[in-house]
């Protein structure tokens, strides 16, 4: 059985309330699956469901707002902490004891590049130069009307 949406539940409950109010007196007794209920009891039961649905909607809105608030403050705090770390490094240097007090690790020094890494950079630069030349040539052809 598929899950019923809150909208569907609310619409059904509203229709049931309308039907109970229209067809039964509040003190009239109805037997439902062998249990006796007054119309007023059934109305109160259905109204509790609507109230619960309203509470879920309010809680969902509050949750979404709380997430927005947390996201906004986190952005600010992240920037401030990053700047604080820079300040601490500037004042105290990369000392493990000082940085450890803040829960930070000492930044690693970049190591020497391997011959393979250098060769890959040279190849990448050559590919970029070639692509840039082709793009500029295409622009020049388009500008002069030769590219048609």
Image (cartoon, rainbow, N blue to C red):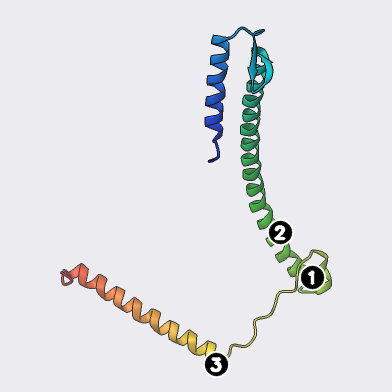
- In the image: residue 53, left or right of residue 134: right
Mark 1 or mark 2: which comes first in sequence?
Answer: 2
**In this rendering, the label closer to the viewer, 3 or 1:** 3
The residue drawn where x is 63% and y is 39% is: 65
Residue plotted at (52% across, 88% down):
118
Q: Label 1, on which residue? A: 92
SS assignment at label 3: helix
Residue nearer the viewer, 116 or 113: 116
In the rendered image of this protein, does residue 64 appear above or below residue 137?
A: above
x, y (%) of residue 29?
66, 11
> Between disc 3 and disc 1, whose residue precedes?
1
Locate residue 110 relative to residue 139 in the image: left or right: right
Q: Label 2, on which residue?
A: 81
Between the residue at mark 3 and the residue at mark 1, the CA separation in whole angstroms equals 35 Å
Q: Quadrant of residue 21?
A: top right
**Residue 124: image location, x then y, percent:** 44, 82
Q: Residue at x 66, y 47 (%)?
A: 70
Could you say whether the residue bearing mark 1 is in a helix, strand or loop? helix
Q: Earlier in the sequence, mark 2 or mark 3?
A: 2
Q: Which SS class for mark 2?
A: helix
> At which x and y percent is residue 67?
64, 45
Q: Nearer the viewer, mark 1 or mark 2?
A: 2
Q: Of 124 and 140, which appears nearest the observer?
A: 124
Disc 3 target residue: 115
């Amino acid at each position: 059985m598929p899950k019923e949406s809150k909208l569907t539940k609310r619409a059904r409950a509203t229709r049931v309330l309308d039907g109970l109010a229209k067809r039964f007196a509040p003190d009239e007794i109805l037997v439902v699956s062998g249990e006796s209920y007054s119309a007023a009891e059934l109305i109160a039961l259905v109204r509790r469901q609507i109230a619960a649905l309203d509470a879920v909607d309010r809680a969902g809105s509050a949750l979404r707002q709380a997430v927005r608030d947390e996201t906004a403050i986190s952005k600010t705090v992240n920037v401030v902490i990053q700047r604080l770390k820079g300040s601490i490094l500037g004042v105290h240097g990369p000392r493990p004891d000082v940085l450890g007090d803040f829960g930070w690790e000492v930044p690693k020094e970049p190591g020497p590049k391997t011959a393979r890494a250098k060769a890959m950079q040279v190849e990448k630069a050559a590919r970029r130069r070639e692509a840039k030349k082709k793009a500029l040539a295409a622009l020049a052809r388009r500008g002069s009307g030769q590219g048609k």
